[in-house]
Image (cartoon, helix red, strand yellow):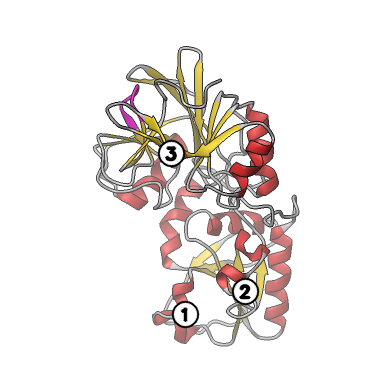
Amino acid sequence: MDFYPKEPLVVWTGKGMYCPAGDFYIDPSHGVDTAVITHAHSDHARRGSKLYICEASGVGLTQVRLGKNINIRGVPYREVFKLGDVTVSFHSAGHILGSSQVRIQRGSEVWVVSGDYKRDPDPSCEPFEVVKCETFITEATFGTPKYTWEKNQDYGRQIHEWWMQNQSEGKNSILFGYSLGKAQRILAELAPHATRPIVIHPTMVDLTDCYRREGRKLAPTRVLAASELLQGQLILSPPSILKDDFRRVLGDYKTAFASGWMQTGNEFGYGRNYDHGFVMSDHADWNDLNRTIEETGAKRVLVQHRNGKLIQHLRAKGLEARPMESILLESTPRLL
């Protein structure tokens, strides 16, 4: 199979990924006529488009992020819909609530855009679904061999034990995590363990409510207030809490960060800035990136935002692999 098809289903443009045959963009960086959104994180769902299409359970999150009055259409997982000359469907990416891989088909040709994805169990969202295709466009956030982590960990128990230890010392436990996705996963992991409400930062409230409305079981929560002095509490928050008005109510505390970057710690200063780290990622590690590519059956792999170890590794295995950004849209598309 030639690496570069004469009429690629997805190309790279100044606004991101574009499907010429369907006349839509996937996670565009600027406003467009039709934006197909893989999930509601701010580097994937941006303001300014005339129409947004996303998986049905992610509609509420997208509206919280972009505004209630956006023109948005929700389509359930695996339901096929037509855009231009292609058929499209969403398939779970296992990243956050409503996160999707985008399957695009023209005739017998199938391309899949992964969006962000993970294979680890997560009670806050649907599990990852392998989608067969000829061309797979994959993320590669942890696309180097040093990022591999133990599977099937009981994060809820680990976090609860850390909280209880700090509580016994009269300290609060501040657990840093992203307001969308990581915070709700932590709450879902803690649901079987927590016997008292977890204190959450105000930026997490509306997003957490979306998860509950979609039927996700989360630990009980209450909103952090600037008027109470806390002691022995578990507080979920972005790092900004240490710089804003809430600082004065935190009392004596220990900190932790929940992220795949805790595998090495260097990127976020683990060991300098945090007392503890939980290697809890919402992205695939090195092994799961390779496992997923193999299970899709793809012969052509395009890697987003990376031209490094993963591409080299795939080429060594005999697969055709290049950066996604190498396929440019011009009057006559070309391969760099």
Q: Are marks 3 and 1 in contact (CB under 8 Å)?
A: no
Which residue type carries mark 2? Tyr
Which residue type carries mark 1? Leu
Q: Quadrant of the N terminus?
A: top right
Boundaries of the magenta span? 19-24
Q: Position of residue 199 (x, y in %)?
A: 53, 69
**Which mark is nearer the camera, 3 or 1?**
3
Pointer 2: what residue? 270
Q: Nearer the viewer, residue 181 or 138?
A: 138
292 relative to 106 in the view: left or right: right
Which residue type carries mark 3? Ser
203 relative to 263 in the view: left or right: left
For the residues labelled 3 and 2, the Cα–Cα distance comes to 35 Å
Pointer 1: what residue? 242
Q: Are marks 1 and 2 in contact (CB under 8 Å)?
A: no
Give residue 185's quadrant in the image: bottom right
Q: Nearer the viewer, residue 108 or 184?
A: 108
Magenta part mainly helix, strand or loop? loop
Magenta stretch containing residue 20, yes or no? yes
**Which mark is nearer the camera, 3 or 2?**
3
Q: Position of residue 122 (x, y in %)?
A: 64, 47
Give residue 87's quadrant in the image: top left
Q: Earlier in the sequence, mark 1 or mark 2?
A: 1
Q: Nearer the viewer, residue 247 or 50?
A: 50
